[in-house]
Image (tube, helix red, strand yellow):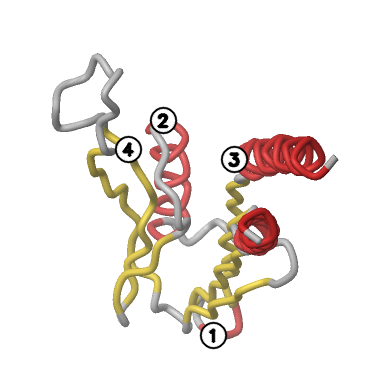
Amino acid sequence: MNKIILSLFLIFCLIISSYLLSLLPRSHTLECVRLPLLNNQVKCQLTHKKTFTTDTILIPINSLQAAGIYETLSERSSSSSYSSSGIPVFKILLYTSQGTLPFTYFYDNDYSSKKEQVLKIQYFLETKTEESLYIEQNNWLLFYFLFFLLIYFKFIVIREFIKTWW
């Protein structure tokens, strides 16, 4: 009886982990266009693409005001040589007249690419000569790392399941 309960629990965990992995955003895009017929007002759209769905946030005309980099400290692992407070990680925030929107849901330690993207957004907002802006950040590496880790875990569970039952 215990083997059946354990097997059902493992199968349940694998199904839930697969579902949660499918919810991870894999790419984030910010698209803005300048509307010449409306005195060069700016209209933007923020898109988070996931495995099965796409979340789109329409940013009202001239609502996007600025972009910035938010820095926090990651949790420190016991094997880390960094100070006990952790290492700095970053993500881009979009400041609108309605509030703050995260460009991505995840933090990472690539400050230089974040800085470059923020500068592109700021340049687009400050100069009136750029007609459009397109910025994309992909999380494919994280997604595939977690995907293959999950597949590896599934093979281990299946192997142990077969060893237990046969």
Residue 46 position (above or below residue 59): above
Q: Nearer the viewer, residue 166 or 73?
A: 166
Question: What residue would you read off at disc 3?
Answer: 142
Q: Quadrant of residue 6?
A: bottom right
- Look at the numbered discs 4 and 1 and tell me whether their residues touch, using CB distance below 8 Å: no
**In front: mark 4 or mark 1?**
4
Instruction: Give the number of marks.
Output: 4
Label 4: element kind? strand
Label 2: element kind? helix
Marked residue nearer the N-terminal end (4 or 2): 4
Marked residue nearer the N-terminal end (4 or 1): 1
Label 3: element kind? helix
Question: What residue would you read off at disc 4?
Answer: 89
- Structural crowding at the residue carrying mark 2, measured as other residues with C-alpha within 10 Å and reported as few (<14), some (14–19) or many (≥20): few
Question: What residue would you read off at disc 1?
Answer: 38
**Residue 132 shows in the view:** no
Residue located at (15% from left, 32% from top): 85
- Give residue 8's position: percent from left, percent from top: 68, 62
Question: What residue would you read off at disc 2?
Answer: 112
